[in-house]
Image (spheres, rainbow, N blue to C red):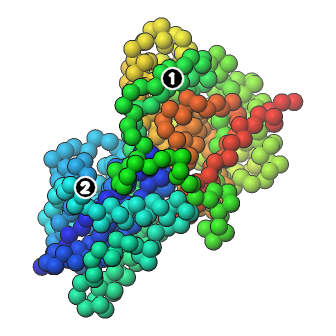
Amino acid sequence: MREFIVEADGGSRGNPGPAGYGAVVLDGATGEALTEAAEYIGVATNNVAEYRGLLAGLRAAHALDPSARVHVRMDSKLVIEQMSGRWKIKHPGMKPLAAEARSVYPPDQVTYEWIPRERNKHADRLANEAMDAGAKGRQWSPSQSRAALDTPPSGPPGDAAAGAAKARAALAESRAAGAAPVPEDAAPPGERHPTAPGEGQGPGEQHREPAGEGRPSGSVGETVDERRVTSAPGWSAAPDLGAPATFVLLRHGETPLTPQKRFSGSGGTDPSLSAAGREQAHRVAEALARRGTIQAIVASPLARTRETAEIVAARLHLDVTVDDGLRETDFGAWEGLTFGEVRERHPDDLDAWLADPEAHPTGGGESFAETATRIAATRDKLVAAHAGRTVLLVTHVTPIKTFVRLALGAPPKSLFRMELSAASLSAVAYYADGNASVRLFNDTSHLRP
């Protein structure tokens, strides 16, 4: 039976930030490189990029010989231990990637080994080349590879070339089919500005920056000055990328809780629009009708968003699709309270929540890291379903801020640096090369008589 060695790596310049992976398939007998794979995947975390590298390496090996035995070597202790079954996969964003990797080969044909970073230079270099290409608005191609110079191709030239071509074709086919979604992994804690999400935009009290936020580089390559990372083109992207999937993000109209600036998530009383909120919805409907660009409407399942969406849909003569992924964060026991009331009743829980995106509100609720995972998965699903179209997403404060944060590659603390008025509009365009650009309207002029 033929034996392959798959070496894979991935990294994120920001965690989350511009990310990419690299993988090489080596002949198990000679150690010679058979084929390479690398890709810039847009904004993602280190762990997501590492799993994507593993998946690409396994697929490339499978394209060469589905009956081969495969030995995977990576410098990611997390991925190796999880795929070996010694560590549990707790994060919901990692579970589908691990399951997909396990499905490429039967489990008894694959073994895993952790190696030091200095022994994973080939895959490391490929991942950095992919990220460098992404920073220039391009995707990596085998002709760009410097890592290929490390090892000559094995066997007769025709066999190696045919195998590499077959592997690249298989990888391209899997990406075109929408395989390997990019869920959002947990991000490091950051400074929090205590603006209460949900209905209100809470007070502007300033908190100090916690220690130990982590270095800005990913797991691949040297430390990166984030100010020097150049984003790929957005609204001015090359025409051959095709029309983007554009999400026009509409926050619902006011409810009775909105003027009082109270937490109102998916675990509370589910208030309907107030009279002012319904008027706002009618006015934004007229504004969108004048623009004439909306082709579909998707709404959160909560009453205030469905009511806003139905008012707009009636004016635009469109149907409304409900997607549970667009719901607001569940704020647990804080639902219905003001920020000041939460500070008075649950000071320790509030401080933890402000300092760490993994922290939960009192009584359970949903962390911002969990919200980000859910929104990223919803984003990927809707982008695939609405390629080249302009879609109105009627949702809430935290989901809209999260869409914007992920598109910009901004840290979790940026959620507390944005303000969204009731019935305000923003937009994010998602291009075929994995890049996104943001247009911030936050315009309520259409709501005034």
Q: Nearer the viewer, mark 2 or mark 1?
A: 2
Residue 152: percent from left, percent from top? 27, 81
- Left or right side of 405 for 117: left
Of callouts 2 and 1, the N-terminal one: 2
Q: Quadrant of residue 399?
A: top right
Q: Amino acid at mark 1?
A: Gly
Residue marked by disc 2: 117
Q: Amino acid at mark 2?
A: Arg
Q: Quadrant of residue 424?
A: top right
Q: CA distance from mark 2 to mark 1?
A: 48 Å
Quadrant location of the C terminus in the rendered image: top right
Which of these two is toward me, 225 or 26?
225
Residue marked by disc 1: 268
Mark 1, Cα crowd under 10 Å, few <14 / some 14-19 / many 20+, is some
| Residue projecting furthest to the top | 344
Cβ–Cβ under 8 Å for marks 2 and 1: no
Task: Give the residue drawn at x 52%, y 10%.
Answer: 341
Residue 171: percent from left, percent from top? 39, 71
Disc 2 secondary structure class: helix
Q: Quadrant of residue 20?
A: bottom left
Task: Give the residue drawn at x 49%, y 56%.
Answer: 42
Mark 2, Cα crowd under 10 Å, few <14 / some 14-19 / many 20+, is some
Task: Give the residue drawn at x 52%, y 27%.
Answer: 265
Task: Give the residue drawn at x 54%, y 19%.
Answer: 206
